[in-house]
Each structure stands twice: as structure tokens, then as C-alpha cells.
Amino acid sequence: MQINESLRFFRKNNDQTLKDILPTKNNPKQSPSKLSRFELGTERVSIREFLEILDNVSIAPEEILKFSNTDAQTEQQQYITLSTLCMKKPNSSKKNALLKYYKHLDSKEKKTTRELSNLLSIKFHFSKLWKKDIPPISQAEIEQVNTHLLNRKYYTKYDYSLLLMICTLLPENTVAKLIRLMIPITDIEKRTPETKAYAYNSLRNIITTRLHENDLHNAQKYILIAKRQFSHSTDYRFKIHVIFLEYLLEYATKPEKLDYYSKIVALMSTLQEIGEFREIESMRSDLDRVIESKQDLKESLERSFAENTSFTV
């Protein structure tokens, strides 16, 4: 449905007449015929009038947008659904559909920020899985995104998506510059959960990368930045994972390793209780990277906790 059709859908289902939902605040003598033509797609209304109409129908702007389909919205939802299916349970049909969309994006000389974000997202998630079909993000693309982000005056959802795609591929001085520009998020109270998720997962990935690189000073710096965002985030996975990374940093740098290992195991056990197995796998991977050269210590710590928990790492 288009927006005008969605409006008619809600009005009819609420048994409201055109007169019931007329925007009359600025024009008390508004005619229902104008609204009728809007529902038919032959008349336009101002943003102010449209918001008043939605209020009279008792529907939030974001809700009517969910019910409405523009070409871009339809394409984006189809991409998200297809990409998610290919990450979870890929089959030849779904893979071919995603590859077709990838080739369509890759062939476009001029791309919107959304299209560039989708293209790099496909490369980010599938270049290792489908090496013969999808190449990794190129250096030229990294430089293109970096230039784009540095020149932006106000960052939006797809800018933060682009940051997520390239933040682990950039040198530290460039990452630091982008984080200074993009975090904290301007007008945070007006942003969607998706926008916040892209921004905060970028921080999470940067911290993880710094830990893997043994750049502990900068890992600590980004952990502090991430924790300052906690009051603006309702994403418990982000918060728990940042706390986990902080424990991992302390485990790598402090002599009281048993204490921090205990905290790490407690976090993982909590995630296991609520079924967050993908988060656990991510934590296991990070933990192994930090202690992979200390197998004797890992075995000793696991024995220490065997009597206190059924959870193993």
C-alpha cells in the first residue's frame, strides 16, 4: 500500500469518516473533498496537515510508514529478509537471489548511501562464506566511505551502517577521528533503534579489534567511550558485551586473572540462561584469542570453575 492507501485502510477500520479526521487547526473550514482526493492519490497535503490527520486517526507516523511501501522501502525490506535468511539457513535459491541483488548494486555507477551500505554489508557478511562469488571490501571502497563520512555534516542511519562495515579495516588514527565526529550521536532522543545499533556495534567491533591486536591502551579508550553511551541505549546485548570486553581487558592486564575469569563465566552463564547462544559464541571466540597462547592457564581456570558451574568455555 502507498501512504494514502494506508491512511484509508486505518480510517475505514476505525469506522471514521473523512470529516472525523479533517486537519482543521489551521483551516477550520477545511473541506473533506481535499482529503478524499489525497486518499485517491490526486491531491497533496502539507506535512503539518498530514501529522494532524494521523493524530486524528490515532496512528503514529512510524506505524503508517511500516504499512506503506515505497520502492526503496520494499527493496530494503526484501534485502534485509533475504540477507538474514542467507546468514541463518542459506539455500541455493536464496543465495542466487542475494547474488543477483549484489550484482545489481555492484553494477550501478552511482549509488545512494543506502545502496552503498547494502553492497558493503553483503561483502562484509558473505565474502568469506562465498569467496568465489563475492570479494571482500576493497581498499578503494574503504577510502570512498572514509571520505564520505569525513565530509558529512550530519550523520544518519546509513552513515552509521557504513561506519560499522569499515571501522575494523581502518588505521587507528582514522577510526579515532571518525568516532570523535560520530559519537555521541547528535539528537540521540530522535534516533531509531537501528541507527543506535549501527553506531554502538561499531564501538563494540572496534574494541574487539583492538584487543585482538593487543592494542590495550586504545581498547580501554573505546571501552570508556562505549560505557558513556549506556544511558542512551536499551540494547542489553551491547551493554553486556562491552562489560565482557572490559573484563577481558582486565583479564589480559591484571594479575587477579581468576577474578575476571569468574566474571566472564558468570556473564556467559547468564546469556545461556536466556538463550543468547550467538553472543556466547562471540565471547568464546574473543576469549580464545586472548588466551590462545596460554593453554595451560585456560585448563587450570576451567578446572577451578568445574565445581561451581555447569557452563564451560
Image: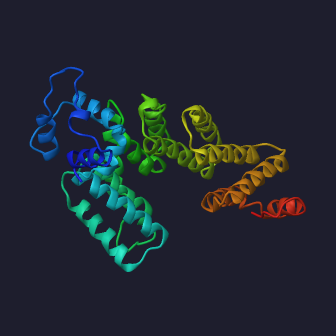
The answer to whether residue 19 shows anywhere in this view is yes
Vertical relation: 61 (above or below) 305 = above
Quarter of the figure that contains the C terminus: bottom right
- Residue 262 percent location from the top left of the image: 81, 51
Count the marks: how many?
Answer: 0
Quadrant for residue 311, please give it.
Answer: bottom right
Q: Is residue 46 left or right of residue 134?
A: left
In the picture shown, does residue 263 fall above or below 303?
above
Please state which of residues 128 and 64 is positioned toward the viewer in this rendering.
64
Q: Position of residue 180 (x, y in %)?
A: 47, 31
| Front residue (pair 83, 295) | 83
Q: Residue at x 23, y 46 (%)?
A: 8
Q: Is residue 152 visible?
A: no
Residue 119 falls left or right of residue 308:
left
Task: Judge whether 203 appears above or below 152 on screen.
Answer: below
Q: Nearer the viewer, residue 27 or 310?
A: 27
Q: Nearer the viewer, residue 241 or 231?
A: 231
Protein image colouring? rainbow
**Residue 265 placement (x, y as % from top left):** 77, 55
Q: Is residue 14 left or right of residue 290?
A: left
Give percent across and percent down for residue 277: 64, 62
Instruction: Name the residue rendered at 62%, 34% in the picture.
Output: 224
Check the picture and name the quadrant holding the N terminus. bottom left
Q: Residue furthest bottom?
A: 92
Give the left or right position of residue 52, taking residue 254 as reference: left
Kindly give the residue lying farthest to the left in the view shown: 42
